Image (tube, helix red, strand yellow):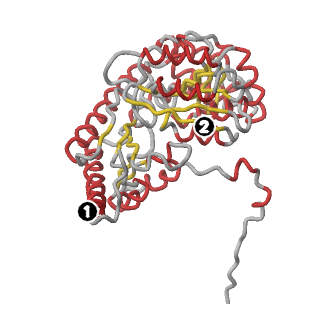
C-alpha cells in the first residue's frame, strides 16, 4: 500500500520582503511552450544562431582552448579580461562611442548589468523612470530593490519628452530619490520604436537639469533594416551609462555584456560585482575576443540584418493581410519586435491559452508595465527567430484567435453587457 507524501515550503517565513513581491517573467514562462514542435513562437527575443558560421566559431573556441588555455580556464578580474574589453571598445567606435577599457566592465549578459545597477544605486522608495511599456526583465531587475518605477509613454518617435518633463516637474528638482532613467532608444523592446535625435538631445538636457542618470540599453542598435544610424546617447554625453551585449550579434549562450561608464561609477559597480560572482567566465571572454578580432564578423552581421529584415517584412505584410481593422501596430526600422494594440476591451492575457491551442505564442502587453495591468489590450510580437513562412502562418492563426475574441466582445457590447471603454 503506497503512502502519499505532501511537501510544504519550509522557508516561506524566511523569504526576504523584497523577494515576496517578485513575479516570474512571462517570456521565461513561455519558453517551455515555445520548444514544442507544433508551436510557432512569436514570444521570445531569440537570435537565429543557425546563421552563425561554424568555422568562425571553431576558430575562436580553438584559440581559447589551445593558444590561451592557461588564461581561459582560470579565474579572471572582476572587471573582465583587458584584451576582451579592448576588442569591444574597438567595435563600439563603429557606432560613434569612444571609450577606454578602464571605462568598461564585463558582465554576464546585459541582464546582470541591470541587476548590478539596481543593487549599486537603488534604495527602497527611490524613483526610476522608464518607457511605458519597457523591457520586462529590466523591471524584474529593478523591482528587487523596491523602487518607485514611473512609466512615461512613447509614440513612433520614442519616449515623449513633453510627458517626461511633466513627470519630472511633479517629482521636483533636487529630489534625492530621483536616481535614474532607463531607456532603449534604438528599436525599443517591446515597442520597436526609435527615439529621434531631437528627443535624445532633450533627454540629455533634462538629465542635467533634474540630476538623474541615464541608462542607455542598446542590444539591437546594429540591427537596422532601414533608415540611417542614430548617434547613441553615450556619444553625446559621457555621463550616460551604456549597456551593451553580444547576445544579438553573436551568441547569447556566451553571456557577455558590458557596462560603459565613468571610471568612478564603475569602481562602485565593481565592488558590488565582486559579491555577485567574483568574476565572469574568462573562457567566454576569450572566445568573444577572438571572434571579434580574428574572424570576419561583419559579414555575419550583414547576414543577420538581411535575414531579420526579411522576417520583419513578412510579419508586417501578414499583419496587414490578416489582422482585423481594429488593430494597430508599430513599424520598427530594426531590432526584434513590434507592438500590437487592440481595442481596450480586449485582454490579451486571457487570449494566450487559445493562441497556444492554435499553435502560436506571443507576449501579453501587461507584462511590460510595472503595475501588471496597463497594456492588457496589447501584445509584443517577435520576428527574429521564425522563418517568413512560419511567421505568416503564425499571424494567420493569431488573427483567427483575435477575430473570434472580437466577435464575442461585439456580441456582449451589442447586448449592453459590456460598456466600451473610451479609447
Q: Position of residue 256 (x, y in %)?
A: 59, 29
Q: Residue furthest bottom?
A: 1
The answer to whether marks 1 and 2 mark residues whose Cβ atoms lie closer than 8 Å is no
Q: Residue furthest left?
A: 321
Residue under pointer 1: 414
Question: Of the residues under marks 1 and 2, which one precedes in the sequence?
Answer: 2
Along the viewing direction, whichever of 319 and 225 lies nearer the viewer: 319
Along the viewing direction, whichever of 421 and 208 lies nearer the viewer: 421
> Above or below — where is 173 with respect to 5?
above
Residue under pointer 2: 149
Q: What residue is at 71 percent from the left and 71 percent from the top?
A: 7
Q: What residue is at 47 percent from the left and 19 percent from the top?
A: 295
Distance between mark 1 and mark 2 Cα atoms: 39 Å
* Residues packed near mark 2 inside 10 Å, few (<14), some (14 to 19) or many (20 plus): many
Q: What residue is at 43 percent from the left and 55 percent from the top?
A: 349
Q: Position of residue 226 (x, y in %)?
A: 31, 22
Element marked by disc 1: helix
Element marked by disc 2: strand
Tell me the number on the disc at residue 377: none
Q: Seen in the image, is 251 located left or right of residue 10?
A: left
Amino acid at each position: 500500500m503506497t503512502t502519499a507524501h505532501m511537501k510544504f515550503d519550509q522557508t516561506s517565513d524566511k523569504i526576504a520582503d523584497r523577494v515576496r513581491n517578485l513575479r516570474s517573467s512571462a517570456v521565461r514562462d513561455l519558453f517551455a511552450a515555445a520548444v514544442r514542435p507544433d508551436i510557432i513562437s512569436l514570444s521570445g527575443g531569440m537570435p537565429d544562431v543557425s546563421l552563425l558560421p561554424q568555422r568562425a566559431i571553431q576558430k575562436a573556441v580553438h584559440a581559447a582552448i589551445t593558444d590561451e588555455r592557461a588564461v581561459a580556464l582560470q579565474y579572471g578580474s572582476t572587471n573582465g579580461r583587458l584584451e576582451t574589453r579592448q576588442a569591444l571598445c574597438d567595435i563600439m567606435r563603429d557606432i560613434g562611442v569612444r571609450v577606454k577599457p578602464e571605462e568598461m566592465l564585463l558582465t554576464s549578459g546585459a541582464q546582470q548589468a541591470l541587476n548590478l545597477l539596481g543593487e549599486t544605486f537603488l534604495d527602497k522608495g527611490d524613483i526610476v523612470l522608464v518607457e511605458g511599456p519597457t523591457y520586462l526583465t529590466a523591471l524584474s531587475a529593478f523591482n528587487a530593490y523596491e523602487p518607485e518605477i514611473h512609466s512615461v509613454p512613447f509614440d513612433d518617435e520614442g519616449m515623449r519628452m513633453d510627458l517626461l518633463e511633466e513627470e519630472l516637474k511633479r517629482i521636483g528638482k533636487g529630489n534625492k530619490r530621483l536616481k535614474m532613467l532607463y531607456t532603449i532608444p534604438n528599436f525599443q523592446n517591446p515597442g520597436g520604436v526609435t527615439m529621434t535625435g531631437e528627443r535624445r538631445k532633450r533627454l540629455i538636457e533634462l538629465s542635467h537639469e533634474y540630476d538623474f542618470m541615464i541608462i542607455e540599453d542598446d542590444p539591437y542598435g546594429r540591427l537596422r533594416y532601414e533608415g540611417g544610424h542614430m548617434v547613441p546617447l553615450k556619444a553625446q554625453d559621457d555621463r550616460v551609462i551604456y549597456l551593451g551585449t553580444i547576445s544579438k550579434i553573436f551568441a547569447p549562450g556566451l553571456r557577455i555584456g558590458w557596462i560603459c561608464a565613468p571610471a568612478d561609477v564603475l569602481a562602485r559597480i565593481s565592488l558590488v560585482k565582486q559579491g555577485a560572482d567574483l568574476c565572469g567566465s574568462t573562457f567566454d571572454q576569450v572566445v568573444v575576443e577572438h571572434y571579434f578580432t580574428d574572424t570576419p564578423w561583419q559579414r555575419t552581421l550583414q547576414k543577420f540584418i538581411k535575414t531579420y529584415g526579411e522576417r520583419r517584412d513578412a510579419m508586417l505584410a501578414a499583419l496587414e493581410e490578416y489582422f482585423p481593422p481594429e488593430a494597430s501596430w508599430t513599424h520598427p526600422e530594426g531590432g526584434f519586435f513590434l507592438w500590437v494594440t487592440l481595442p481596450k476591451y480586449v485582454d490579451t492575457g486571457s487570449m494566450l491559452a487559445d493562441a497556444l491551442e492554435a499553435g502560436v505564442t506571443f507576449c501579453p502587453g501587461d507584462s511590460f508595465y510595472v503595475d501588471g495591468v496597463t497594456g492588457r489590450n496589447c501584445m509584443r510580437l517577435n520576428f527574429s527567430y521564425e522563418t517568413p513562412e512560419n511567421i505568416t502562418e503564425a499571424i494567420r492563426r493569431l488573427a483567427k484567435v483575435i477575430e473570434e475574441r472580437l466577435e464575442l466582445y461585439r456580441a456582449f457590447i451589442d447586448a449592453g453587457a459590456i460598456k466600451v471603454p473610451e479609447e
